[in-house]
Amino acid sequence: MNRKFLRKLYKAILILAAGLWLSLGQKGWAIIPTIPSTALPGNGSVVAGSVTSYTGGTLTVSGNTAILWGNGTLNNLPQGGSVPGFNIGSSATLTITASSFSPVLNVDVTGNPSQILGTLTASANTPVFVANGSGIIVGSSATINAVGGIGLLGYDLSSTASTFAGTVSVGSTTTGSFVNIQSGASISSGASILVAAPQVNVGIAHPGSISYVNNFFVLSGYSFTSFDGTALLGQSPIAESSGSITISGPSSGTFSFVIGDFVESSGSITTSGNLILPGGKNTQWGTGNGINLASGVLTNNGTLEFTGSSLTGGVVTGSLVNNGTILANGADLYISVGGSITNNSGATITGITSTGNFNVTLNAGVHGSPGNGIGGGLTTWEQSAGLIVLHSVLPM
């Protein structure tokens, strides 16, 4: 074979490999198999509660039900579209229902990521949890409508499935990988939405792409004691972990979290598009490294606001880097972080908005905490119009 042919063959192999493999950080390299457009969850094993029927794309459960998908015999036989694991093809619809209150935990144990590419619906009686230690992908054309609440967990919950009592939890040693919600996906809940994994990516194409009645929780590198579809309890950063959250907001219109929501990463948070993040202490980052909080960074590449017009993580958060615009949200803007604040050239932090002109106060560094490795200080290449009060609180 001549060199020209070998070069073409080599390029073809690289292109094929790029299409089959996805780098997943803590999970190394994981293959993403192609699933049929009609695929529905298959090879299920019921380890808690009961499944009274599974036919025609409808899964009917009773009691606190947990199913390990991938190592059993439960299949949607009449349609013939079942494949091992918890997957929903692009043209498939899975409906989960129950005659009485029956939360259901779906754990994929195949070793491959779960792919939700079609439609998942669930009644108010059935809070739904999907867990997969190898990752979860919600495709750009997917629709999830879970009236009783939805949890997407990129963690392996197989060892606790048999004792499922209606709530899910993640411990400090629970293994996991990622949840990737692609831009264009639609997720709605009549209760709350939880997305949790060591690596989380949330793409929000439109302000209404993600809707909910109660709260939206996004966690990375955090343990928690309970989520029942509505309330999240006992979240805590996992020591020495480096969580990663990326949220891409809409380019037209603004997606807003609400008071009571949480966005918490033990490592970094990266934002783009138009977003209003939870204010106060409900957005946290860098908390997995208590020795050097400043190593965790919230990087804004879009237009960012905060509910209540404040970000007061203070000593419990890392550094802030602004490459875009940070706006006051209807009140004086107050930002206090444990690390440093960098407002790069061309970026803007401003209190001048369409609803009025407001003051901006920035605090960086930790007072009275020597030797904690937090640099503190402010770097401001460009100050916006209006009053900006800059405070640099350095370690003593």
Image (cartoon, rainbow, N blue to C red):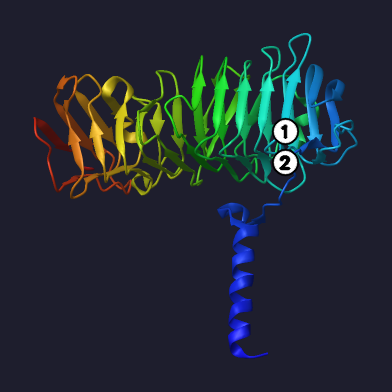
Residue shown at 73%/23% (left/top)? 95
- Whole-percent x, y for residue 384 in the image: 12, 37
Q: In the rendered image, is residue 372 in sight? A: yes
The local crowd at label 2, few if under 14, some if 14 to 19, many if 20 or more residues have their Cα within 10 Å, is some
Element under disc 2: loop
Q: Is residue 153 above or below residue 164?
A: below
Please name the residue that numbered disc 1 is placed on.
Answer: 92
Measured in 3D between alpha carbons, the distance from the residue under mark 2 to the one under mark 1, in whole angstroms, is: 6 Å
The quadrant in which the C terminus is found is: top left
- Which residue of the protein is positioned furthest toward the top in this rendering? 100
- In front of the other: 143 or 373: 143
The amino acid sitting under disc 1 is Ala
Element under disc 1: loop
The local crowd at label 1, few if under 14, some if 14 to 19, many if 20 or more residues have their Cα within 10 Å, is many
Q: Which mark, residue 37? A: 2
- In front of the other: 112 or 290: 112
Residue shown at 64%/28% (left/top)? 169
When asked about the image quadrant of residue 143, the answer is top right
